[in-house]
Image: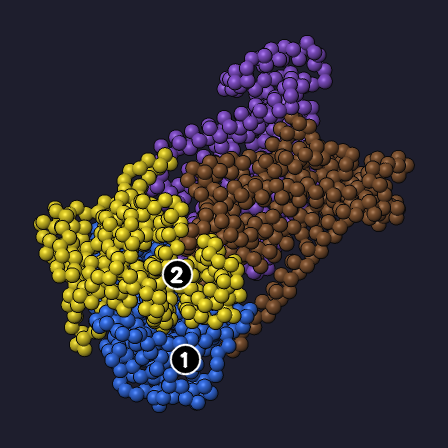
Chain colours: A purple, B blue, C brown, D yellow
Amino acid sequence: MGRFILVRLLQSIVALVGISVFIFILVRAAGDPTILMRSSQTSEEDAQNIRVQLGLDKSQPEQYWIFVTSLIHGDLGDSLIKRKPVTEMIMAALPNSLKLVLASFGLSMLTALLLGVLGATRRDTWLDNGVKFIAILGQAVPNFWLAIVAIYVFSVVLKLLPTSGTGSLAHFVLPVGTLAFWILPGIMRLIRSSMLDVLDSEYIKLARIKGLPEGKIIWKHALRNALIAPLTAAGFIFAMLITGTAVIETVFSWPGVGRLTVEAVMGLDFPIVQGVTLMVAVIVLTVNLLVDILYAYIDPQIRYQRT
Amino acid sequence: MNKIILQVEDLRTYFFTRKGVVKAVEGVSFHVNEGETFGIVGESGCGKTVTGLSILRLLPEPAGRIVGGKIVLDGTNLLALSKKEMRAFRGRMVSMILQDPMTSLNPVYTIGNQIAESVRLHQNIPDNKVREEVISALRLLKIPAPEMRLRDYPFQMSGGMRQRVVGAIAMSCHPRLLIADEPTTALDATIQAQYIALFKEVQKTTGVAIIFITHDFGVVANMCHRVAVMYSGKIVETAKTREIFEAPKHPYTSALIESVPRLDRKDERLYSIEGQPPSLLNLPPGCRFFPRCDYAMEICGEKEPAEVEIGKDHFVSCWNVS
Amino acid sequence: MEETEVVTGEMDYGNTRRASIFTQLTFIIPAFVLAVLVFIAIFAPAVAPHPPNKMSLTKRLQPPAFVMGGSRAHILGTDKLGRDILSRAIYGARVSISVSLLVILITSSCGTILGITAGYLGGRVDGLIMRITDVSLCFPALLLAMLLAVSIGPSFLTVVLSMSILGWAPYARLIRGETLKLREADFVAQARIIGSSALRIMVRHIFPNIINPLIIMMTLSVGMLILTESTLSYLGFGIPPPTPSWGSMVSDGRSLIDRAWWISFFPGIAIGLVVLSGNFLGDWLRDKLDPRLRQI
Amino acid sequence: MSEVLLEGRHLTKHYPVTKGPLKRTIGWVRAVDNVSFAIERGKTLSLVGESGAGKTTTAKMLLLLEQLTSGSILFKGKDLHQFTRSQLKKEYRPRVQAVQQNPWSSMNPRMRVKTIIAEPLVVNNKQSKKQTRERVMELLEQVGLRPEHADHYPHEFSGGQRQRIAVARALALRPSVVVLDEPVSALDVSIRAQIMNLLKDLQVKHDLSYLVIAHNLATVRYMSHRVAIMYLGEIVEYGEAEMLFENPLHPYTRALMSASLLTLPEENGKETDQIILSGEMPSPLSPPPGCRFHTRCAEAKAICSSEEPEIRTVGTQQVKCHY
């Protein structure tokens, strides 16, 4: 198992380098990078020392080397608007985003598991059709619009919940609710279809032949096998989650990394966007690695192949 | 070999699909004696597997329904039981082995776990005794080094060994009746012979009655005491195995035996039955083998032949005979 | 395989007939909605009651006609610059349709070609393509859109580009999976036995057998793409104003939600309706063409 | 011994076994080991053995679907290594065709029957459209199907009918050798006889030579003139079909026959002397030393586990066993 993780780590690092090269090229794609680095107030003289600081006079590979070494020291350059180091700003905003992401991920996973399994085991009953309808609705409606309607209903009309900002638990309800409701359909559909496949299999037929009660058949025999397929999409779901968070944070003006980035894009504050992209890449790659390890735990056959 | 353990009378199982009602099993009757191996042989789609599944009341949903007849196992009519009562029967009184060993076992649980599960379910014995019971089940099926094998996963075993584990699961709660649905079809010839010899021994030691469902006449000859030949949802002939091979009375049975190449002699030209079995959606009136039968008479096309006893334990449904 | 009840007499299977009417509907309604959408997108100038960007400061924040204070001139009301919401919504359809169709064309063709090559040739080619696909699948498209918006500025091209650079990955993964199954099939071996070239096999044998899953995925991605496009416009780096797009219309209404709910409400409904139809059509196609494919 | 069309000499195929994500090779699966045989004009040779014996791999080598690890294939006495790529395509491939086991996956479900049968002709751009259509109709008729079947799709046919279409396709290029990989094992019992009779009639009519891959001995006896019994990648017995079935020499052949014979249960339940093999099929990754069958052979002696037996010729039969 150890060797496998080592190799996967290597692959992730390669992917990370790939992404950093992509950003490096992108920065220079629009001509002189200092145009991007300069916000409206910086004078020509400031632009010149940015150019020197970035060593733009040196050859391309050398520039890339400087770019990477500064990266490794965690120095993502300074925000053009706020003049503060990017890393600091990201670290400040990260905890808020993490709270939002973990809460909604947890909520949606639990509900999706429950509804997915129930939907699969009671096929074509009112429950199954109801679940399917919510799934289709959830995937159809844009999450920012849903959030706005939720604000209108719960805050403006019913005045139960705050319209935005963080602080008390009440602030959490709407953002987490809308984000979870948006991811829920995708996961639920995956679990339901993988559950249906497993329920058709021979070993489930054998479990029934043994005379096992339905409950045991579903929650012991079927579920564990049914979790293998959705796991492969965990990376994809996580990417959707990050996208969703950025949007929800903007709607609820939640001080997370998402809003920070959107505002940075507004102000053409390139270093922040670049820093966030790299950070997200690291998170995504780690999540993939964790999923692979979890994979081996659930499916013994893979565990044996990999040691 | 005389006490009847299972009596099936006029069993009718239909599948209600959008395209219409598929009459998979149409009035099947037979009995199985204690300690006997009763063979059900026929081509694919003749209803032999559906008959087996109907006895366990485990038809593929949503369309499968038993619409008529009685299944009496050791004095109890299984069709009269509630779902809960029937569930208690499964595994304890009657059990089943499926065809493909590669998919019959749950890939993510160990062998020991899957056997212990049915032992704990049906035999109320203290936990420390369960392990012994599991090992004795494995030993019954002659699986080498059972203590070691407990912790193995299915993918670590060959097809033949897995089919033995499925056998161990089925026999772990000492059922009175075992239904084997083509258990050897996916195995190689030598492993198949091994499996059949093994099950003959298991039958001797445990006295379990076996219904052996297959399309392979070689297996029928080696394994079964009595045989029923099925065609398009009905039993056309039932007799002792030797009589079926040496003196088949129904045209389909004899045609089927003649179209199987023999290993002990060089056949010049095999007899081949023309055409295909009728679709179960719109069945012709009269005898179902009528369109393909060489001895077809006018009446065969109109009325279904009744079952006639033409010898000791030898029943045939054909107008030519009665 | 469920426990079988014992039934005496005829079993009614009415619900199967009811089910078939329901499936009919899941085709007719979405197909009709999408057809209407394409129609109004093409003939927007003729259909829209007012020019989309015509402002009139006197009629600012007018509620929809059916609400007190609304007027028939602006059925769905006006936004804070007095522009007619219905007309802007109609023109907004143009943006959504053109963006999603263009992106679908690009992503499905690249994805299919890469998917078939990776699936059929296997080995290093397959390994390389799959590594790239995995990374693109897990990389949030929104972030890429932000990067592009910052570096080459928001425009129609930026939106299409940001959705296409990553959009081909799901196609590649699906088509590769299907190709791997087909490659094992005997008729592919048979084609090689009679001497067909790898290219001919991919075109004549593999491609015709992956059209079903391809069509299903394309239909389902209509909804997904319109959602992404409207998210980008909502955050402000999609199609630059003043071109009307549903996403930016919802974003304009965000701050006025308490006083003028209709500014954000109706474009949201439009997005929802179209995406819903796309998904329903996709589901219907999947049941018709390839029920086994529940994974998408 | 009529003229030899296709001959395999010391054919060997080893698959590398890789482990872990770095794909390091840690062993070799010796699927086929030093197998030699000859297919004569108008005659049928059968490769018989259980799964894992290497019969299909051997067939794939002949059909150029698998590379040879070593050994050579001779077509009409000429070694394939001397053929250039285009010669292979023009002179060898059209002459050797195949019918596969599973009628449900051996045809492109998207193509009509007439396109499927015509494809070999189209790929090798043999003749004009009209000639091709006529040839297709002729082939349909030869395999017992009617011309109006030409426009239907494969899913509209039963297993037996599909196998007939596969045979028609295999005959399109007038091949001299047809490889039949388990041609009837996927079919129902009554349909098998129809197809076997069809194949035998076509063999006589077109002077075809067959290489049949099968595991059912009775089918093999009905179809073949010469038989090769394979075990774990090696030919353990090879010779005239009738001689081999009348008195099998190799213990494995005897065990295989006793497992497939119709031994009716004696009236009084006395067991007939059936040979039941013990143990499992060893893994081809590490075949047992000496004679590969010694681990399961009832008559195994000390020499069997140490020395690999020579192939001895007894009359017209060849057998690989010390006894």
Image point (61%, 41%), residue name: C106
Which residue is the site of mark 2?
Answer: D174
Q: Is residue D168 visible?
A: yes
Which residue is the site of mark 1?
Answer: B292
* Above or below, comparing residue C40 to residue C83 in the picture: below
Left or right? Give the position of A180 relative to D233: right
Q: Residues within 10 Å of mark 1 (few under 14, many from 20)?
A: some
Amino acid under disc 2: Arg
Q: Position of residue D244 (x, y in %)?
A: 18, 64
Residue at disc 2, secondary structure: loop
Q: From the image, which quarter does the C terminus of chain D lie in?
A: bottom left
Amino acid under disc 1: Arg
* Above or below, comparing residue A286 to residue D130 in the picture: above
Q: From the image, which quarter does the N terminus of chain D lie in?
A: bottom left
Res B198 quadrant in image: bottom left
Badge 1: chain ID: B
